[in-house]
Image (cartoon, rainbow, N blue to C red):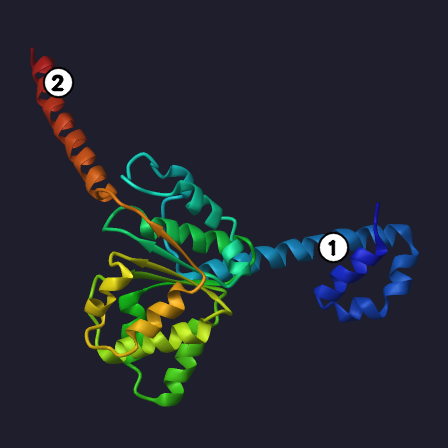
Amino acid sequence: MIDPDELHTLATNLRLHGLLVHWPEVMAEPESARRIAQWLGWEADERGRRSLERRLRDAHIGRFKPLADFDWNWPAQVDRAAVEDLMTLQFLADASNVVLVGPNGVGKTMCACNLGYQAVLAGHTALFVTAGQLLGDLAALDSDSTLRRRLRHYAAPDLLVIDEVGYLSYSNRHADLLFELVSRRYQTKSTVITTNRAFAEWGEVFPSAACVVSLVDRLMHRAEVVRIEGESYRAKEAHERLAARTKQRAVKPTAARKGQS
């Protein structure tokens, strides 16, 4: 059954002003109303599809392993319930941060990418960037006006994912820029950080930077911290591929000899 009020709201949301001007006469005929309902549905679906494609493209998440394929038995320590709860995206509604801590190859980036992807599917904007890319980009700008515009670019998404904090050391200027960005998003937008360093070690990431304590304080306030411990899953997969290739090479000569006999 066609609800005229719902259709009118949909046409308003789609900004079909010409249609709205003639709304009473359009809805007077049942067949006309049925067609309008079908066309509005098509338009809403297509705009939704294009919006999703655009937000996914702008998010720069790239390829990643879905959380459904993650081997939860591999890490020595991981709070699966906490990760799955984060996937509900309640932390976005609270403008809380997420910090994923652990050594290389245990799934921090995979979890972060899944959070970004889930946020986009839910209608939010997201942006994935490595710490090196982010800070290198900002530090290269020598014009104050250009820097302010770029900071607004990184401050704008509903969810900002900053990957690999702690893998490199940065200057005081880099620390100040990250502090400025985090401060702009503080208590208004959510930020996901992946790092191989505990916050107590961030002084080694940003040596001598005066703002490190304040930076950590803003990130940690109302943040969900998930620690993942264990051996590198990428190393495990590499060893498995090597073993499979070695086994395959051993079978080939045997098969060739059988063919010659």
Q: Residues within 10 Å of mark 1 (few under 14, many from 20)?
A: few
- Quadrant of the frame with the N terminus: top right
Q: How many marks?
A: 2
- Quadrant of the rendered image containing residue 39: bottom right
- Left or right position of 74 against 244: right
Viewer-nearest residue: 17 or 124: 124
Locate residue 184 relative to residue 253 in the image: left or right. Answer: right
> Which residue matches tag 2?
255
Which percent across, then down, holds residue 6? 79, 56
The residue located at (48%, 72%) in the rendering is 156
Image quadrant of residue 238?
top left
**Mark 2 falls on what kind of element?**
helix
Distance between the alpha carbons at the discs numbered 1 and 2:
63 Å
Give the amino acid at mark 2: Ala
Residue position for label 1:
39
**Left or right side of 188 for 42:** right
Residue at 26% across / 67% down in the picture? 132
Q: Where residue 123 sits: x, y (%)? A: 56, 58
Per the image, label 1 sits on a secondary structure element best described as helix
